[in-house]
Image (tube, helix red, strand yellow):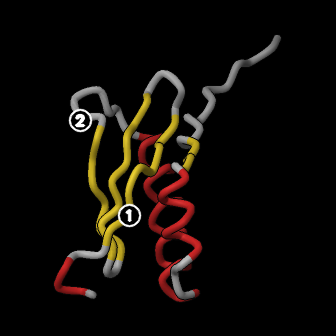
């Protein structure tokens, strides 16, 4: 007899726009490490949640950055569309 075990939902895949790649390339190492950890946690979180009620475009604050991302549930992707420093952190 074969048993089928429930599969864990895989995390969302994170993709970057050209603008976000540019901003990532300008980050100091410590900020990049915090950014990468936050984005990995975000992707894993969406893999575990029922996200149907949440808006597709959202913001994430990481250290001194505000990250704008779009969620595509059908493709299971998070597209980072913008990374900004608030005016008071410059």
Q: Position of residue 27 (x, y in %)?
A: 51, 80
Which residue occupies 28% across, 41% down? 57
Find residue 48 and report its image quarter: top left
Tell me the element at label 1: strand
- Front of the two marks 1 and 2: 1
Quadrant of image for the C terminus: bottom left
Find residue 6 and report its image quarter: top right
Q: Where is residue 50 in the image (x, y as percent from the top left)?
A: 34, 32
Q: Mark 1 points at which residue?
A: 83
Total numbered badges shown on the rendered structure: 2
Q: In this view, does 78 lie to the left or right of 33?
A: left
Which residue occupies 54% across, 66% down? 22
Quadrant of image for the N terminus: top right
Tell me the element at label 2: loop
Q: Mark 2 points at which residue?
A: 54
**Residue 20 vertical position relative to residue 57 in the rendered view, above or below:** below
Q: Position of residue 2 (x, y in %)?
A: 80, 14
């Amino acid at each position: 007899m074969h048993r089928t075990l429930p599969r864990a939902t895989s995390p969302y895949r994170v993709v970057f726009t050209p603008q976000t790649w540019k901003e990532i390339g300008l980050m100091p190492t410590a900020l990049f490490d915090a950014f990468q950890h936050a984005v990995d946690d975000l992707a894993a979180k969406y893999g575990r949640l029922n996200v149907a009620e949440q808006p597709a475009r959202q913001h994430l604050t990481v250290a001194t950055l505000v990250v704008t991302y779009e969620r595509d549930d059908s493709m299971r992707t998070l597209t980072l569309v913008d990374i900004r420093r608030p005016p008071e952190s410059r």
